[in-house]
Image (spheres, coloured by chain):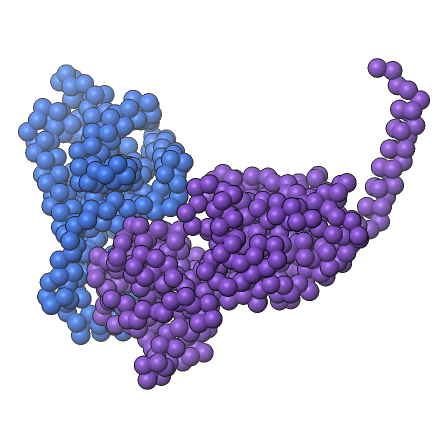
Amino acid sequence: MDNISLLVLAPVLNVQLLVDGLLIGAIFALVAYGLALVWGVTNVKNLAQGDFVMMGGYIAYSMTLVGIHPLWALPVAVVVMFCFGWALYKIVIYRVVDKDLFTSLLATFGIAIVVQQVLNLIFGPEVMIAESGFEVGEYLDGGLTVSNVKIIAFVMALILALIVVLFMKQSRMGQAIRATSQNARAARIMGIDTDRVYAFTFALNAAICGAAGVLISMIWVIQPYFGTSYSIRAFVIVTAAGLGNLPGVIMAGLGLGALEQFGAFILGAEFQQAIVVGLLLVILVIRQIQQSRHRQVVK
Amino acid sequence: MTKSRFGKVSGLVAGVATGAVAIGLLASQPASAKVEGDTITLGSAISFTGKYSTNGIHASNGYNLAVRMINAAGGVKVGGKSYKLAVKYYDDESTPARGAQLAERLIKQDGVKFMLGPYSSGLTKAIAPVTEKFKIPMVEAEGASRSLFTQGYKYIFAVLSTSEQYLASSIALAADIAKQNGKKPGDVKVAMAFENDPFSLDVRAGVVDDIKKHGMKIVIDDKLPRDISDMTATLTKVRAVKPDLLVVSGHSKGAATAARQIKEMKIKVPLVAMTHCESAKVITKFGASTNGFLCPTQWSETMSYKDDLFGTAGEFDALFKKTYEGYKNVPYQAAQAAAAVMVWKDALERANTFKISAVRQALADTNMKTFYGDIKFSAAGNNIAKPMALRQIQDGKLNVVFPARWATHKVEWPRK
């Protein structure tokens, strides 16, 4: 393996791959956290997760068209996507919340397709970027280059995660969300309007995705159909970390980012996404084994 | 209205005539062309809506302009009579299945016997089996995939260079530069990143053939996934192995991703070549960081090709911009579409009949010079007389630098 020997001969390459992986991994973690939130509270597996991310990206792109710096799109995307999420809940999601798994998967898959097609109609199929104009930093004698926008995105992702965690712990709504996720029926008996909690959770997730999309559009490229790969990543992270396990989600997100980079370096770029899907398979097998053991105890 | 005796007679005549025509068609179908009065109708299913609509409209503008010019210059002379050209269009909605359906409709219902191509290799691939089945010749200008010409099709003729030629010239250029610098072409190290899709793999096949011919060394051979949004791992490798030439092809998403990350990672490779620089608008998006990129093109208005209809390539460019508003640059898709109509005129006049077999033979024998380039078809139907040109981004402008015959500027090497 020539590529592995390259990594041994030039250790700085490891640093580059690791840094790139971790910085992008933070954004994956953010998207995955949103998914875990909705999954845990409403038990809806949102297949349109990545497409919400793309919507956020297009909000940033649209703002650059009128000369506004894409970082300003962050609050805009949060607000717009929150409203979008709320509306979507009221129109579609609330009908499938207490239905079986298949119904909610089908509904969100349908939403994903509609979002993709609408984005394609409005913005066309070409890839777009939101240019931030930030400098690129060179470190370790030019062996390591890190674009400042990636660092900013990383910090933003952390801040957003922190805000969400504080919100969940401190605010009344956050407490209601947690109560509902623990036992929706008990929460209802205690006077919590669970329908409102569901709507809020779904909207919050859309807002988180929107913010992640803004960051993605400044770092990578966006295209109406690119959302699916973010959905898959989010599912991998959540299935690996488990629901309601924020430190786990963050670690899995960062790990996945780094793994993609190393995998693409060693095996070739064609394996970058194959690795993600392969990992999902492995995790599912492991989970299955764990669960079958668990079931034996329950019996 | 009462039916007159004349009406009855004419009805009878019409009935007999229809029967005769039907028998004639059955006996030797297809015998003659869609020629009504003094008009020859060409047919095309092309993308006016959907994801290829931008380029579909460019192409139809090219068709229309050529038709107008040919008609203004006296039309097409067949059997001592002048005919006007017209094009019947259908919108294929950028979907191959619809394209194939509409091609069949053009041939079976509308009686079109001379076809113009759709936009994109995918649509052409869908339509070619239909034209083949009905033995209707099609001159196409927008399907470059090599696989169109390996199926043994007899009725497809393409005026453009095929996809495996797109970046092959960058290998020749790298070999030239190596020689100028007292090195052997065999010392040149090439890094390749191609999307895993039929078009890009065609481009790759051409590049690999030429790399082998020059004995160059492939140091990176990455295949990019379909939804490419990150190339950092590949570019990290590029930084480590320091190739002399980096070749990228992955439609406009590949070009945009590569350009963005080459800038962001400050990748310094003496030569960088990629397809779709123009459609990805890399110059406007990434500015000075794209200087030095080599971008292949089918045609450029600075080339010294010319013909009697449009004049020089430059004159076509000016006329096109004057005719259609909103074009800053004339896309080569429009130029090659116009050339396809010129091929029809030339072939019909040489055939001097509308008999399909004779017209097909005339198309196969085509050997003409146009503002778009020389056109001569191989047995498989692709144009073998016109090379791809390479343009380099120099101070935000695309200048032709290779092959030497068409170069307006010297190649800037190494890339800064």
Q: Would you say B90 lies left or right of A147 here?
A: right
Q: Is residue A12 visible?
A: yes
Q: Quadrant of residue A190?
A: top left
Check the picture and name the quadrant holding the C terminus of chain B.
bottom left
Judge by depth and name the residue closer to the eye, B374 or A253: B374
Residue A212 point in image, percent of width and height: 21, 41
Colour of the chain lettered A: blue
Q: Is residue B281 above or below residue A185?
A: below
Colour of the chain lettered B: purple
Q: Would you say A42 lies left or right of A119 here?
A: left
How many marks on residues? 0
Q: Quadrant of residue B191?
A: bottom left
Judge by depth and name the residue closer to the eye, B107 or B195: B107
Check the picture and name the quadrant holding the N terminus of chain B.
top right
Residue at image location 46% in from the left, 67% down from the top: B406
Q: Is residue B142 visible?
A: no
Residue at image location 18% in from the left, 66% down from the top: A13
Q: Is residue A217 above or below residue A195?
A: below
Residue at image location 32% in from the left, 65% down from the top: B272
Residue B153 point in image, percent of width and height: 64, 59
Residue at image location 12% in from the left, 35% down from the top: A164
Judge by depth and name the residue closer to the eye, B22 or B309: B309
Q: Is residue A289 above or below residue B171?
A: above
Q: Is residue A164 above or below residue A225?
A: above
Residue B86 point in image, percent of width and height: 66, 43
Residue A27 point in image, percent of width and height: 19, 45
